[in-house]
């Protein structure tokens, strides 16, 4: 069975600083996708970034980038130049070819301090 | 492009009552999902539709939960009768659902319905 683990329940960082959120996962499949979703207090789950397992290059989206370590089954999210609007719950998620169901971690509550 | 729409946004009911949630996916999206998100946890898939057919309902408590997507567009999730442990946010998501491996499609989420069962 696939699992996703987020070991940091809460984090806080000063505005404009860089923060890294950790995620580890487990799957027996070679074909899978990893995601980071952001859920602000308004509850709308928004896709932040997506990584295909077969791609060695780390995905980037503006201030958001990932460090995908396939052998270690690690998928961390780095937010650069953090902004107040980045305050939210962040969920790491995995979907693989065998299960084809999106499995979420328990989330990390990130607070950006002015 | 309009996103996934859900209603109502909030619902408070007594235990043993019935409740229904509505979802309208992004136009053209063939796949629709219902998730349950209990406070402090990540969303858990309840049911997945491909057009108007059920792909996966293995985690749906079928003794009290039901869902339908009759015309392959919008969907309704019903709980009857509700229990205290059903208090959660119910999220609807949709994806394009194109190709033979639809799991590669990104899922887009609606704002959710917060259900409180007293």
Image: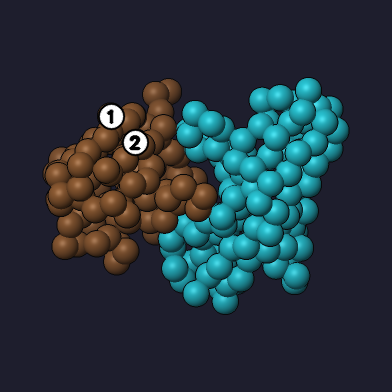
Q: Is residue A17 above or below residue B79?
A: above
- Disc 2 is placed on an element classified as strand
Residue extending farthest to the right is A17
User: Residue at the spot x=38%, y=42% of the render?
Assistant: B89
Residue A2 in view of the camera: yes
Residue A17 lies, in percent from the top left, at 85, 33
Q: Which mark is residue B113?
A: 2
Pick the residue in front: B60 or A13. Answer: A13
Task: Answer whether labels 1 and 2 touch (C-beta < 8 Å).
Answer: yes
| Crowding near the residue tagged with mark 1, few <14, some 14–19, many ≥20 C-alpha atoms within 10 Å | some
User: Residue at the spot x=38%, y=56% of the render?
Assistant: B45
Residue A56 located left or right of residue B77: right
- Spatial separation of the CA atoms under disc 1 and disc 2: 6 Å
User: Residue at the spot x=66%, y=51% of the render?
Assistant: A9
Residue B103 in view of the camera: no
Residue wearing tag 1 = B8
- Disc 1 is placed on an element classified as loop
Q: Which chain is brown?
A: B
Residue A2 located left or right of residue A79: left
């Amino acid at each position: 069975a696939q699992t996703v683990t987020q070991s940091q329940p809460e984090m806080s960082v000063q505005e404009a600083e860089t923060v890294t959120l950790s995620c580890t996962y487990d799957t027996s499949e070679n074909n899978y996708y990893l995601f980071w979703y952001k859920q602000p207090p308004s509850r709308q789950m928004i896709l932040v970034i997506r990584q295909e397992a077969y791609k060695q290059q780390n995905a980037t989206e503006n201030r958001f980038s990932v460090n995908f370590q396939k052998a270690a089954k690690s998928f961390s999210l780095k937010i650069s130049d953090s902004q107040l609007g980045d305050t939210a719950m962040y969920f790491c998620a995995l979907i693989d070819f065998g299960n084809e169901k999106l499995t979420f971690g328990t989330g990390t509550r990130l607070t950006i301090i002015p | 492009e309009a996103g996934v729409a859900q209603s109502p946004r909030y619902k408070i009911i007594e235990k043993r009552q019935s409740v229904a949630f509505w979802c309208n996916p992004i136009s053209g999206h063939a796949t629709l999902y219902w998730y349950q998100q209990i406070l402090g946890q990540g969303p858990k898939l309840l049911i997945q539709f491909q057009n108007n057919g059920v792909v996966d309902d293995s985690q749906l408590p079928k003794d009290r939960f039901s869902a339908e997507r009759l015309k392959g567009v919008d969907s309704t999730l019903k709980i009857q009768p509700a229990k205290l442990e059903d208090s959660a946010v119910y999220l609807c998501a949709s994806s394009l659902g194109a190709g033979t491996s639809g799991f590669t499609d990104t899922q887009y989420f609606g704002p959710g319905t917060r259900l409180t069962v007293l």
